[in-house]
């Protein structure tokens, strides 16, 4: 059965007016950009809603942080929602962990296009366009499993068909599912059939009737990284965060434009709207490397990154691993500052974005300090053994994944071909030393 054509944007973790963490000393101009980045990104989101002529905006949690008590966040929300109301764009708000329903001040007269959903709501909400149901929306929770619904969703949707078209059914739940990280350098589009066979929902959400549609789109809110999972049938999706606020959020940031046509296919497109971009760039410093060569490598690494349309500032953390005289000299704040300034000048004319840089140094032969714990040494020994004894470590791991569906094995093989084994080992070594050793190299922001 064909679907009623509809288009909406799914956003999460906007955290309006929440401030960035782990910044260090930056210029006054960069500080101003950082302070306003979430508010400016929200303004870009409102513009995107109008530009793409969506039917509704879905905000699935943590639109602001209640403990911030931010007046600016409230003003931004009101002004943004009023703009959408003028274009007859509906907004559906699901409270999250940090913006509970009580924090939204329901006594205030919000614009008429706003609908709040409580975690206790059991009713299915009809999203209308010109009097016709184009989608249904429902909070899913342990208190009201699907089996308790008076009508199955696929049966209920048929009641609203005017031309034998079925409305898209949307469920909302804060799910803790595995994460699939992708390095996205621009807007991306992914088409997902709504008739898949893989089951990723917990048993209590699975259909008790063959070929029955539970929900076509399951909106998630868990963490700040984007992830998508195929269900049976349909898709579960979390857009992550529209604007990263620390170096731990340097992966894909954005909101998701969801388009459903008359066919049983759902198209997801990631819209990058962030003002500030957080980047972690790794370089291996060989003993023979000169300062001029290092600046050239750093320049190439920066210029290889594609600037987003709205980006004004890049927060760059350099992870240097190596040894030698040049490497040791970079432990000095003075030398780091000089290197940072020189690099900024070389890319100034070719990269129209502000850059703030910090440095993290990791020696190749790092000695343990502090507690004399052997955990870090043991971890590094096991890692080195695995690396030397295994010619293709990632392929070996996949060979042990015979229990997976063949479609997933094919996907993992495709991803493996694009990965760098050495970078993965470097990351594993860094994480092990960070987690298992109480001491760490000092990080200096310049």
Image (cartoon, helix red, strand yellow):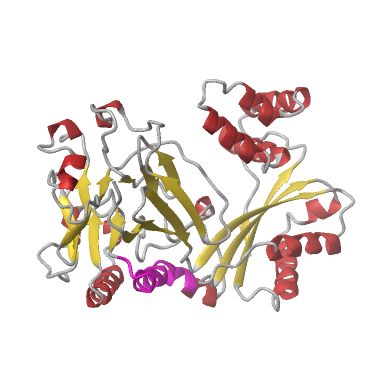
Q: Which residues are magenta?
A: 33-54
Residue 40 highlighted magenta (yes or no)? yes
Horizontal side of residue 136 vs 343, given as left or right = left
Seen as rendered, the residue at the extreme front is 163
Name the spot of residue 9 as percent of width and height, x first.
35, 60
- Is the C terminus in the top left, top right, bottom left or bottom right quadrant? bottom right
Name the spot of residue 352 as percent of width and height, x first.
63, 76
Res 235 → quadrant:
top left
Residue 22 highlighted magenta (yes or no)? no
Question: On screen, 45 above or below 237?
Answer: below
| Dominant SS in magenta | helix
Question: On screen, 158 above or below 82?
Answer: above
Seen as rendered, the residue at the extreme right is 288
Task: Pick the residue in front: 416 or 325.
Answer: 416
Residue under the point 59% across and 57% down? 279
Name the spot of residue 433 as percent of width and height, x first.
63, 36
Residue under the point 53% across and 52% down? 251
Residue under the point 26% across and 45% down? 171
Task: Pick the residue in front: 334 or 296.
Answer: 296
Horizontal side of residue 221 vs 117, given as left or right = right
Res 395 → quadrant:
top right
Task: Pick the residue in front: 338 or 295.
Answer: 295
Residue under the point 53% across and 32% down? 407
Q: Is residue 401 visible?
A: yes
Q: Is residue 373 visible?
A: no
Horizontal side of residue 191 vs 304, given as left or right = left
Name the spot of residue 337 as percent of width and height, x first.
70, 66
């Amino acid at each position: 059965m064909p679907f009623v054509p509809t288009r909406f944007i799914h956003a999460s973790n906007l955290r309006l007016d929440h401030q960035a963490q782990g910044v260090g000393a930056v210029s006054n101009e960069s500080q101003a950009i950082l302070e306003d980045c979430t508010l400016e990104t929200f303004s870009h989101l409102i513009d995107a809603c109008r530009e793409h002529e969506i039917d509704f905006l879905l905000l699935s949690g943590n639109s602001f942080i209640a403990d911030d008590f931010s007046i600016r966040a409230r003003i931004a929300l009101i002004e943004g929602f009023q703009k959408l109301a003028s274009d007859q764009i509906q907004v559906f708000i699901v409270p999250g962990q940090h913006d509970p329903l009580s924090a939204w001040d329901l006594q205030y007269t919000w614009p008429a296009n706003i609908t709040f959903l409580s975690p206790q709501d059991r009713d299915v909400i009809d999203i209308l366009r010109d009097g016709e149901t184009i989608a249904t929306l429902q909070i899913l929770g342990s208190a009201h499993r699907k089996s308790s619904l008076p009508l199955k969703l696929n049966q209920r949707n048929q009641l609203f068909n005017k031309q034998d078209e079925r409305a898209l059914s949307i469920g909302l739940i804060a799910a803790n599912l595995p994460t699939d990280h992708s390095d996205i350098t621009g807007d991306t589009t992914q088409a997902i059939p709504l008739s898949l066979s893989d089951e990723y929902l917990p048993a209590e959400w699975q259909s008790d009737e063959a070929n029955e549609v539970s929900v076509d789109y399951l909106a998630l809110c868990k963490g700040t990284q984007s992830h998508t999972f195929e269900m049976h049938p349909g898709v579960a999706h979390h857009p992550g965060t529209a604007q990263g606020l620390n170096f731990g959020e340097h992966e894909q940031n954005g909101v998701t434009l969801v388009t459903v046509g008359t066919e049983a296919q759902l198209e997801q497109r990631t819209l990058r709207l962030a003002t500030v971009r957080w980047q972690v760039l790794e370089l291996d410093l060989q003993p023979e490397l000169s300062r001029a060569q290092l600046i050239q490598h750093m320049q190439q690494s920066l210029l290889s990154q594609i600037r987003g349309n709205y980006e004004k500032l890049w927060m760059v953390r350099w992870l240097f691993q190596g040894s030698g005289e040049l490497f040791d000299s970079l432990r000095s704040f003075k030398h780091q500052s000089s290197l940072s300034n020189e690099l900024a000048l070389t890319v100034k004319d070719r990269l129209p974005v502000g850059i703030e840089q910090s440095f993290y140094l990791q020696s190749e032969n790092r000695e343990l300090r502090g507690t004399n714990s052997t955990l870090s040494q043991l971890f590094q020994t096991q890692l080195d053994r695995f690396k030397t004894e295994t010619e293709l470590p990632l392929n070996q791991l996949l060979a042990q994944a015979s229990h997976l569906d063949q479609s997933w094995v094919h996907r993992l093989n495709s991803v493996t071909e694009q990965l760098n084994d050495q970078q993965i080992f470097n990351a594993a070594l860094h994480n092990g030393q960070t987690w298992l050793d109480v001491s760490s190299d000092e990080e200096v922001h310049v």
